[in-house]
Amino acid sequence: MPIKIAIIGAGLIGPRHAKSVINNPDTELIALVDPMPTGIQTASDLGTNYYPSVSALLSSPHRPDAAIVCTPNQTHVPITKELLSGNVHVLLEKPISNTIETGHSLLSLASSPEYAHLKLLVGHHRRFNPYVRATKSILENGSLGRTIAVNGLWTLYKPDSYFAGNGDWRTSSARGGGVIPINLVHDIDLMHHFFGPITRVHAEGILPQRENPTHDADEGAALTLRFASGVVGSFVVCDATPSSHNFEMGTGENPMIPKVENGSDFYRIFGSAGSLSVPDLTRWSYDNSGEKSWSSPLTVDQIEIPDNAAPFDLQLAHFVDVVRGDAVPSCSGEEGLRALIVCEAVQRAMRTGQPVEIDVDLLAGSKK
Ligand SMILES: NC(=O)c1ccc[n+]([C@@H]2O[C@H](COP(=O)([O-])OP(=O)(O)OC[C@H]3O[C@@H](n4cnc5c(N)ncnc54)[C@H](O)[C@@H]3O)[C@@H](O)[C@H]2O)c1
């Protein structure tokens, strides 16, 4: 039997998830929930049932087995708790919440015995991106030697329309807006996925380009990162500069953001035996150079991308496996909270001008 899935939130990203659900033979799109009247038309376009609230959905004849939560960040925890309480598995869009406290409260609820049979997956879908999977396997096969350092960029320009109308929550830090919880959180999750937990951050905020009041959300920062593994990193994030150096333009994974061919690398990873740039997957080493020396010519390998499957589709297939008990979540609630904790540390470092230590055991006690 296909898993009946409801989409909660019919804004920018909800309909994209809905299309993955429609295209997957193991899932059925049972309903769309959004309080805005525009949701009625979106539901009709998707050929599904419409409800204005999760409570209306749960008391309807179209109760789902699972739901994908695609609502503004500050609503993630109350909506997910309501769904779990209604016996519904949840794929929750990132970030897990807009505050660490509420993120912890969700993990506590989700790990209590009453809800142990229900699954919670956080939607850090980039883990399923083919460039990310290829990078992960290069790191795991040891061809870079011991990883020493990483350098990253997430820089682009968001238009005014992104912040207008219904999207005005994105202008406000208090409502979970800003480039750090919305975008950097993805990169932080990938840093964790590649190199393990981050234990210390420092951050300097960039010069704001948008008018405040109206905008009080962060526009960017320059960061240093230290990982428990000893790896160190540096990163620039900014959503107010015309630039191609970002995950979306480098990989072409977002249909709204055109892919830029050549010259749009966003990560460089440095190891004892070689270095790698992503997403072009160029590996530099002295493998064929006689002496391992700066005066020898570098060996350049171009690594093939194994496939180009859509990350949202792969994430949904994984969610199906998780719901059926055939897989454990690739990005659990804990991993989602871990990324949020680092984002909060980045924001604190920006405010105080001081490095912020992150306790990797902060998550002890929350299990799911
Ligand atoms: N994984 C990704 O690449 C990715 C990309 C974009 C957005 N997101 C995440 O998805 C979430 C939604 O982002 P968006 O850009 O689609 O936002 P959006 O503002 O475009 O859409 C959010 C929708 O949720 C609806 N909504 C608000 N409260 C609701 C409630 N209680 N019940 C049901 N619907 C409700 C709004 O009416 C709106 O239509 C955010 O958490 C964002 O961080 C993830």
Image (spheres, helix red, strand yellow):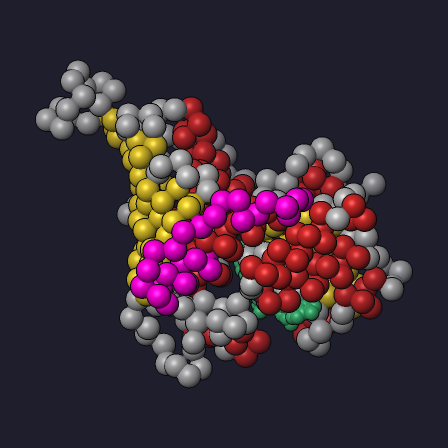
- Position of 334 with respect to 288 (left or right) is right
20 or 65, nearer to the observer: 65
Q: Residue at x 40, y 35 (%)?
A: 229
Residue 160 among magenta residues: no
* Residue 367 shows up from this direction: yes
Residue 165 location (% of width, % of height): 54, 79
Q: Is residue 218 above or below residue 330?
A: below
Q: Residue at x 49, y 45 (%)?
A: 360
Residue 322 picture quarter: top right
Residue 344 among magenta residues: yes
> Which residues fall within the magenta stretch?
343-368
- Position of 16 with respect to 5 (left or right) is left
Residue placed farthest to the bottom in the image? 213
Q: Residue at x 73, y 66 (%)?
A: 33
260 or 123, nearer to the observer: 123
Residue placed farthest to the right in the image? 61
